[in-house]
Amino acid sequence: MPELVHDTTREGVVTALRAALGEGLIDSLIKPNDDVWVRVSADVWQQAGRVLRDTVGCDYFCFLSAIDWLPSPYGRGEDDPTAPAPERDSTIKQGYTGGDTRMQVFARVTNLRQHFGVTIKADVADTEPSIESWVTVYAGANWHERECHEMFGIDFKGHPDLRNMYLPTDFEGYPLRKDFPLLARMVKPWPGIVDVELLPGDDADDAESE
Amino acid sequence: MTDLVDRQKLSYIAAQAADARLNVELETEGMTLNIGPQHPATHGTLRIIVRLDGEQVIWAEPGAGYMHRGYEKLTEVRTFPQVTALVNRIDWLGSFANEVPFILAAEKLMEVEAPPRAQWIRTILFELSRIANVSLFLGDLGVQLGAITPVFMAFRDREYVLNLIESATGGRFHPNFDRIGGLKEDLPAGWITETKQVMKKLRNFCDEIENLLFGNEIFQSRLRGIGVIPAEVAKQYGLSGANLRASGVDWDLRRDQKIALAYDKVDFKVWTHPDGDSFARCWIRLQETREATKIVDQLLDGIPSGSVMAKVPRIIKVPEGEAWVSTENPLGEMGYYVVSKGDLGPFRVKIRSASFNNISIVPWVLRGVYVPDVISILASLYFILGDIDR
């Protein structure tokens, strides 16, 4: 039986968050000596940021973004546009630390003295997703939240200025949501989706197991 | 507003006073000045709108998005090996360095590790990208302060490095050379001796630039004490790379994390500077270029033999999971958060690029400075547009 590896630094992160947030900390995942993921409920998002900054010592802001867990209804754009669209699996399955909603906001902060980072996630509602802003906790979250707002349509309460960064002001839709089609692929399917051509004598199983 | 040097504090107070005077007492009209999108100081197309009172900036706002290519969306319709061709174009002056963290993230999910020789060559090419990238900065810096000569020297010596990258990878600007499990090919014959000679030239180049620019009185007075960023603010904004180390934070991802590159095999110094001003940022970059040539030299001496490709299936499917890998790129911390669903391609890739964070501090740092300093501060923060817009 392999020896159970303990990672006291990262376990300390989870302990500190549990002590401060209680029920607000929903789930956590530690990969010893590698990384740590935590999921908190949306109403303690800002408080969790403060705990990470002040108690855990992660005062370096790395990034903030979101994930849309809906599998893309358009696949990878390899379909023939003239044929009827194939049936696709649309079950939502979240990644590490689970989740209950289609979209999740996630961020990463780093402790520069003890050399570890924490990835923190929170569920946001499916309709009119919104969450507290981190601008008062980490000033650098400002631009990341603006980007996230225009790309995923998530509202950050308390953000001073949620103008678009990239898209025109009157742009409709949220490009990084999975149900937003990549128009270039809708017009012409991507020819290089499988870039490995099998050699004579190969069959698909060989290529995968080699 | 604590911990600031007097000059910054005074200029902040002056800006506040100017603001009040502007609006209430004298009803003077401020001026809005538009810099860019096409401006030599913007390394691409960044627009900066500044509101001025006389010569002083009272408000500044960068406008990005003139070069947004939507790589995060595009990665979702590509297979894993195809993504490197896209991410090459994020920081186009140090292209190879963009591929490495993505490949490492994919390898982490697949639990494969490149053979030692591949790791060493990766590290060498990584540092060569740094030299190619930062030597252009050192030349360009002169141009933005009114000195023409350094840029010719920079382009002359950067050419040697690009030739090396070309002869090893086949691509001068966009190598697309890194593969999951190793590298496309081994080094060509004679490359190691040639690289050693070029590294000598580059060290001479660093000395030349140091004598020509950094000792120059005008250069110093244009940069010293200008655009001071205290360590606390720098960390809050997520500044990374030389910008963070210039504020006195001793943090370098080459040294401070376990990563499948050969940095733990070499001896190098991480330079920091306590001042946090524009001069410190430029000075750190100069030292880092010199340090990079030494890293390359050490790696060339000890490069192990063997294969450059691990055994990976020809059709690559990455197992389900999430991984974050970041490396110390020429511009700062560049990382990829890769989510895989066990498919041919990634489910979601969040690209954390250094310049996006580095430039988000502009509204804070430009408040209260004088107009000519706007350009020198932007130059010293050093950004590549492709790295902001992605």
Image (spheres, coloured by chain):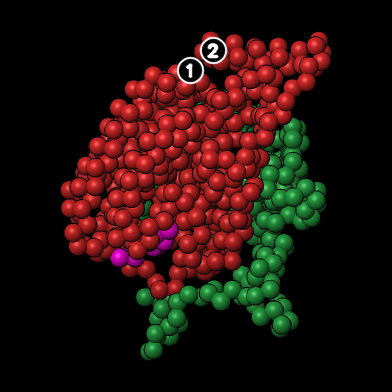
Q: Which residues are magenta?
A: B174-185
Tell me, yes or no, whether the two marked residues, 2 and 1, touch with CB atoms within 8 Å.
yes
- Disc 1 element: loop
The chain shown in green is which?
A
Tag 1: amino acid: Gly
Tag 2: amino acid: Arg
- The x and y percentages for residue B294 are 24, 40
Residue B101 visible? The answer is no
Is A4 situated left or right of A69 in this image?
left
Q: Is residue B310 above or below residue A168?
A: below
- The x and y percentages for residue A11 are 49, 37
- The x and y percentages for residue B365 are 58, 25
Residue drawn at x 37%, y 36% is B150
Identify the hue of chain B. red
Q: Observer-nearest residue: B249 or A68?
A: B249
Q: Is residue B160 above or below residue B215?
A: below
Query: What residue sits right under mark 2 in the picture?
Result: B7
Residue drawn at x 62%, y 43% is B37
Q: Observer-nearest residue: B159 or A174?
A: B159
Is B268 situated left or right of A176 in this image?
left
Q: Main secondary structure of the magenta part?
A: loop
